[in-house]
Image (tube, grey):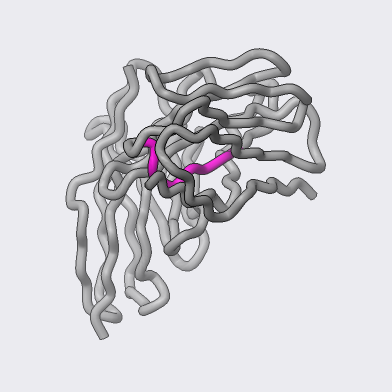
Amino acid sequence: SQTIHQWPATLVQPVGSPLSLECTVEGTSNPNLYWYRQAAGRGLQLLFYSVGIGQISSEVPQNLSASRPQDRQFILSSKKLLLSDSGFYLCAWTPGGGMFPSPLHFGNGTRLTVT
Amino acid sequence: AQSVTQLGSHVSVSEGALVLLRCNYSSSVPPYLFWYVQYPNQGLQLLLKYTTGATLVKGINGFEAEFKKSETSFHLTKPSAHMSDAAEYFCAVRTPGNQFYFGTGTSLTVIP
C-alpha cells in the first residue's frame, strides 16, 4: 500500500533563517506531488505541484521554492523566512498519469511558526 | 479558472440533527469533486468523491453528497450528527490539469 511521510511535524524558526520541509511517498511510482499551505480561516492554498522529476509548477509568487530531486521526494524550501510564512504545510500526492481522477492523499502536515 | 465556495465558515448542529454543509463550484468543464475532513493538527482525510456516474455519492462515516450540475453544487449531508463529526470540512475540485482547489472550509460544531 502507498504511504506518505512528511517531516518535521512542528518547526519553530526565526525570521531570516532557511527552511527545508521534506515529503516522500512510498509504494508507488511517478506520483503527482503537491505542497499546500493552510492559514487560519483561509483554507488550503496550492503552492506547488509536480508531475515528474524536475517538473515544478508554481501557483502563486512566494518566498518559497520547491524541488523534486527524486521520483517520490518533494522538498519545500526558503532561503529566508518571513513572519508571513507561518502556517500549516501539507504535502499530498495522487497517482500519476491522470487516467483516473484519483483523490489527493495527504501527509500529516508540518506546523511552521516563524518568530 | 476553477473556484470553490463554501457558504458558512462555522456550522453548529445538535447531536442527532441533520448536517448540511454547502459547496458551490465554478468550472468550465465537468468537474471532479471531493469532500475532505480535517481533525486538529492533522492532514486531510477523504470523505467522498464524485467523478462520473451516479450523482448521489456515499462516503465514510455516514456522509453523502449530491452533485447538481444545474446548481453547480455539491452539498455534504449526514442525517444524524455525532459528536465525533466535529471537525473542519473542505470541498475541493480537481482540474483536467491535475490541480486541486479547495474551499475555505467549514468548521462543524456538534452540540450535545
Residue extending furthest toward the bottom = B112
**Residue B14 higher or lower than A68, as above or below:** below
The majority secondary structure of the magenta stretch comes to strand
| Segment colored magenta | A85-92
In the picture, the quarter occupied by the N terminus of chain B is top left
Kindly indicate the quadrant of the structure image that contains residue A92: top right
State the residue at coordinates (73%, 48%): A3
Q: Position of residue A112 (x, y in %)?
A: 46, 47
**Residue A8 higher or lower than A49, as above or below:** below
State the residue at coordinates (33%, 74%): B81
Q: Nearer the viewer, residue B103 or B17?
A: B103
State the residue at coordinates (53%, 22%): A65
Q: Position of residue B72 (x, y in %)?
A: 27, 32
**Residue A37 higher or lower than B89, as above or below:** above
Name the side, left or right, on which A47 lies relative to A1. left
- Taking the magenta stretch, the answer to whether it contains residue A30 is no
Q: Nearer the viewer, residue A75 or B16?
A: A75
Q: Nearer the viewer, residue A19 or B47?
A: A19
Kindly indicate the quadrant of the structure image that contains residue A14: top left
Name the side, left or right, on which B72 lies relative to A53. left
Name the side, left or right, on which A108 lies relative to A40. right
Examine the rendering and report whether any part of residue B93 can be seen. no
Q: Position of residue B96 (x, y in %)?
A: 50, 18
State the residue at coordinates (46%, 28%): A80
Examine the rendering and report whether any part of residue B108 can be seen. yes
Kindly indicate the quadrant of the structure image that contains residue B2: top left
The total of numbered circles placed on residues is: 0
In the picture, the quarter occupied by the C terminus of chain B is bottom left
Q: Position of residue A52 (x, y in %)?
A: 70, 18
